[in-house]
Amino acid sequence: MSEAISIRMDPACERLLAAAKNFPVAQLARAIDRENQFTVGYIQRNKLSLRGPTTLGVVTNRLRSSIRASKARWSGTEIESSIGSNLVYAGIHEFGGTTKPHIIEAKPGHALAFGVSPVC
């Protein structure tokens, strides 16, 4: 299960939020849904597809395609939305951690390599 994340807003965001209270909640929820889709696209494109020190650079499409945004739900003046993955190992990729010992085997017709540089 995921943990709740608390976000502290700076004064400019607080003023923006105060101004947003005059908008209909349904419009705000649609805007959140739209922004969530942009965020999912950004994560998939820039954090899961590229290689570099601040990316995961996934090899298969399983993790990349598992990132989803929930539809914003509202009750009264409260709106709830989330972005996440249903894969167990997604949290380890995001927050770090370890897995219990397990055997890593090559698939039939493939070889395993661990940091091996080619010999010329």
Image: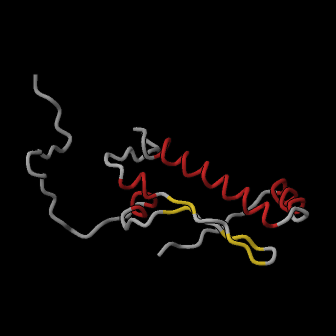
Which percent across, then down, holds residue 23?
A: 87, 62
Quadrant the C terminus occupies: top left
User: Which is nearer the eye, 4 or 110?
Assistant: 110
User: Which is nearer the eye, 49 or 71?
Assistant: 71
Which percent across, then down, holds residue 53?
A: 43, 41
The colour mode here is secondary structure
Image position of 76 with respect to 12: above or below? below
Tell me: 108 left or right of 43. left
The structure residue drawn at horizontal position 49% and vertical position 42%, both measured from the top left corner, is 45
Which percent across, then down, holds residue 115?
A: 20, 40
The structure residue drawn at horizontal position 20% and vertical position 68%, both measured from the top left corner, is 101
Tell me: 35 left or right of 25. left
Which percent across, then down, holds residue 69?
A: 56, 61
The structure residue drawn at horizontal position 88% and vertical position 63%, both measured from the top left corner, is 18
Outermost residue to the top: 120
Tell me: 62 left or right of 24. left
Image position of 2 with respect to 68: above or below? below
